[in-house]
């Protein structure tokens, strides 16, 4: 049985992100491995520092795994850290860079194996987007290839900050049958180990298929 999964709409590691406590408790983790990969060109250590301050407040350690380039995703030492983790968190910024670093890498294989074995996995903003296939292309709201952990479903992060025009464009361009989930900041769409979905955190989640709003029970 796969572990819990959280698709976070951004604004992570702030007041309102109540879901992190639940993820920790679900897997008994005393450490969170944070990958600031998507922020490789935007001071990735700042993300690790923010995560450290947040998880310190929850009583657990944070390990920043500085996988910022392709060679880091091939590094056996980094792969071994992920293999030993109970909770891995993919931070945000550039989904395109995050995808290019992780795709078809031993480190991505280790993430998949860990999640299949019960590890908690969270992705925020770019980290949530890239877990889907297809994923929303942030450059224009259309679609591009993701990593494919979740197929037939895609995520719009920061949904509470999107314009109606951009949302409308994305829904119009969505392939037939694709589920589009708009996730607000400081909010997570959480899939429990048993497969059920729920919304946790400060905001809301709205899901559509073929332009029509649907219930969470219809998510894969």
Image (tube, rainbow, N blue to C red):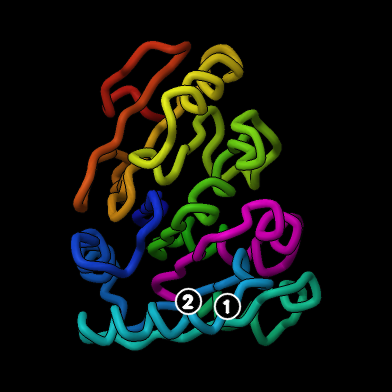
Q: Which residue sits at x=57%, y=20%?
A: 174
The residue that mark 1 highlights is 44
Seen in the picture, residue 87 relative to 200 is either above or below; the reply is below
| Image-based side of 16 in relation to 40, left or right | left
| Image-based side of 135 in relation to 160, left or right | right
Asked if marks 2 and 1 touch (Cβ < 8 Å), the reply is yes
| Image location of residue 102, percent across then percent down | 69, 61
User: Looking at the figure, which quarter contains the C terminus?
Assistant: top left
Q: CA distance from mark 2 to mark 1?
A: 5 Å
Seen in the picture, residue 90 relative to 194 is either above or below; the reply is below
The residue that mark 2 highlights is 47
Disc 1 is placed on an element classified as helix
| Image location of residue 76, percent across then percent down | 72, 82
Q: Quadrant of residue 27?
A: bottom left
Q: Which residue sits at x=44%, y=57%?
A: 124
**Most extreme residue toward the right, as rendered?**
71
Q: Which residue sits at x=64%, y=47%?
A: 147
| Image-based side of 111 in relation to 96, left or right | left
Which residues fall within the magenta stretch?
85-111
Disc 2 is placed on an element classified as helix
136 is within the stretch colored magenta = no
| Image location of residue 105, percent across then percent down | 74, 63
| Image-based side of 200 in relation to 90, left or right | left
**Nearer to the camera, 28 or 98:** 98
Q: Count how many numbered circles sit on residues in the image.
A: 2
Seen in the picture, residue 96 relative to 210 is either above or below; the reply is below
86 is within the stretch colored magenta = yes
Q: Which residue sits at x=56%, y=64%?
A: 111
Seen in the picture, residue 131 relative to 159 is either above or below; the reply is below
């Amino acid at each position: 049985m796969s572990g819990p999964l959280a698709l976070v709409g951004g604004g992570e590691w702030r007041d309102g992100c109540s879901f992190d406590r639940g993820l920790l408790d679900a897997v008994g983790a005393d450490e969170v491995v944070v990958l600031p990969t998507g922020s490789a060109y935007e001071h990735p250590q700042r993300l690790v520092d923010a995560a450290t301050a947040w998880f310190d407040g929850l009583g657990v350690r944070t390990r920043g795994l500085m996988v910022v380039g392709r060679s880091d995703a091939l590094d056996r030492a980094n792969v071994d850290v992920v293999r030993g983790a109970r909770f891995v968190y993919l931070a945000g910024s550039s989904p395109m860079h995050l995808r290019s670093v992780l795709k078809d890498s031993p480190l991505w294989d280790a993430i998949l194996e860990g999640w299949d074995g019960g590890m908690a996995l969270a992705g925020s903003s770019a980290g949530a987007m890239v877990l889907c296939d297809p994923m929303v292309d942030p450059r224009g709201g259309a679609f591009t290839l993701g990593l494919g952990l979740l197929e037939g479903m895609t995520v719009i992060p920061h949904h509470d900050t999107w314009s109606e025009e951009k949302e409308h464009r994305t829904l119009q361009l969505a392939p037939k049958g694709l589920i589009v989930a708009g996730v607000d900041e400081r909010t997570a769409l959480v899939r429990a180990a048993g497969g059920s979905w729920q919304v946790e955190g400060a905001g809301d989640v709205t899901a559509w298929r073929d332009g029509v709003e649907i219930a969470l029970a219809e998510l894969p």
